[in-house]
Amino acid sequence: MFRLTEAPIEIRAMRDTLSNPACGGFVSFEGRVRNHHQGSEVVKLEYEAYPKLAISEGNRILAALKQKYGLSGILCVHRTGELSVGEIAVWIGAIGVHRRECFAAVSEAMSLIKESVPIWKHEWYANGDDEWVRCSHEHEEAPADQVIRHGRPPSGPHPVATIMKEDGRRRY
Amino acid sequence: MFRLTEAPIEIRAMRDTLSNPACGGFVSFEGRVRNHHQGSEVVKLEYEAYPKLAISEGNRILAALKQKYGLSGILCVHRTGELSVGEIAVWIGAIGVHRRECFAAVSEAMSLIKESVPIWKHEWYANGDDEWVRCSHEHEEAPADQVIRHGRPPSGPHPVATIMKEDGRRRY
Amino acid sequence: MIETSVGLDVTVEYFALFRSCARKSLEKIHLDESAPAALYDALRARYRFPLAKELVHLVVNDEYSPWDKALQPGDRVVFIPPVSGG
Amino acid sequence: MIETSVGLDVTVEYFALFRSCARKSLEKIHLDESAPAALYDALRARYRFPLAKELVHLVVNDEYSPWDKALQPGDRVVFIPPVSGG
């Protein structure tokens, strides 16, 4: 249900995977590469993943959401490697009988994936700088529902979300 | 921004319309024709619209949401005429800088369009019955935000949502 | 000739359920009074519309209108049964 | 021969920021103690990782692990800097 790909994401193939004549609702999200980051023009962008853990963590998140929202299906594909502005970095789609559950699941999936799936964005800027981006550009968001974070380390809740909140978008 | 079409909805064309290199978030919803309605097998389905009012009312809703959520763009296409099971009856897409606003806008757009845009679904069932469907199959939903209902008749808030709540899915 | 009628002529369009009941899409109707509610009640009786006025919206000249609006000669009137798009 | 070492050998993999700092993807390291925090502190000093341990997650053999876990010989260890997918 969670995949990584170095090739451009084919929306049609993803949509076709999520098809069920009993389901009336389909919601999808695309995260597209933007031409700027905090006012700096982005000239190059790469995503790096820790594949094995990204897939297991991504699947854990999607399976929990599928059950929580009673979905017929939920799917996420994340790009790795170099991307151009406007390309799709991540695609999430869900189908179900009720549309509200689909909206909630896709939105929550994106939040949780941004928080805990080991994928990193490396950006190069027009001024010659580059950075390993520290967190999502949407750091104003409320933390996603805690209830499905059961796969986390036994030492306590995964602190990434909290760190993001406090630090915003610090550069290294 | 709100369109009616008798031809199958082309997702790619819709997506291409919503493209902006400054916007990282894209959310879309598809309402697909289901093979059943309250336990009855659906063998034929048609949507009829009051075109002029549907377009003006749809555009009013989308323009209000675009402003409310600060979107870069929002678009809705609704099919009319006869549809097959699995076909897309309605497509809504939104792009913006922040994904939460896109999710909220698309979800709210669907609720408001179901409530107040003059489009009607006519279903024929395997047992020979047919009906003008009275309301959405998702009658358990909370009413959408009242704030953008400013285009409504001056006699008071549009009562459709309330009627749907009370009556559920009555057949005529 | 002496015009004895004090009424007005309007055009009524029918959609969806009301079109099915009336078995037509459009007709011109002569009214003795300008109240849309009286027009609806008359059509409801004539065509057996299965909906009380409270479930129906009034549209005059392609705009939602309150039921207490007085109809004018030449108005195009549509009664809107509960919608079910999406 | 007499084995004087009481330590253990582990493999450390580097991703993203840590790979950039270490300028390598993987190395074998001999440890004198089994505490992952001691390993992180040593690597942080060696490669100038710009992140306190509190900002980093520990993964052992492809699973998130608490920092008080004792490393075993042959473990594959990954330190996870803050993620930024999506």
Image (spheres, coloured by chain):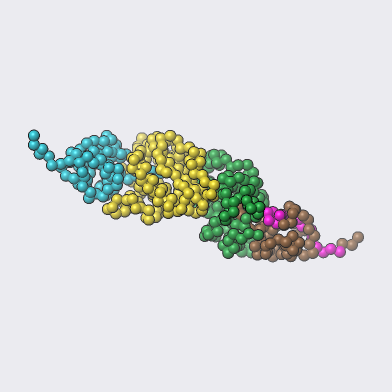
Chain colours: A yellow, B green, C brown, D cyan
The structure residue drawn at horizontal position 45% and vertical position 41%, both measured from the top left corner, is A32
The structure residue drawn at horizontal position 45% and vertical position 35%, both measured from the top left corner, is A8
Point out the image quarter for the N terminus of chain A: top left
- Residue D40 visible somewhere in the drawing: yes
The structure residue drawn at horizontal position 43% and vertical position 34%, both measured from the top left corner, is A7
The residue stretch that appears in magenta: C4-20
The structure residue drawn at horizontal position 27% and vertical position 48%, both measured from the top left corner, is D65
Residue ranking furthest to the front: B127
Residue B32 in the magenta stretch? The answer is no
Point out the image quarter for the C terminus of chain A: top left
Residue C11 in the magenta stretch? The answer is yes
Total label count? Answer: 0
- Residue A104 visible somewhere in the drawing: no
In this image, A132 relative to C83: left or right?
Answer: left
Estimate the x, y position of residue B81 in percent, counting from the top left. 65, 46
Estimate the x, y position of residue D37 in percent, counting from the top left. 21, 47
In this image, A44 relative to C25: left or right?
Answer: left
Estimate the x, y position of residue A81 in percent, counting from the top left. 38, 35
In this image, C56 relative to D76: left or right?
Answer: right
Estimate the x, y position of residue D18 in percent, counting from the top left. 28, 39
Residue ranking furthest to the right: C1
Which is nearer the eye, D78 or A83? D78
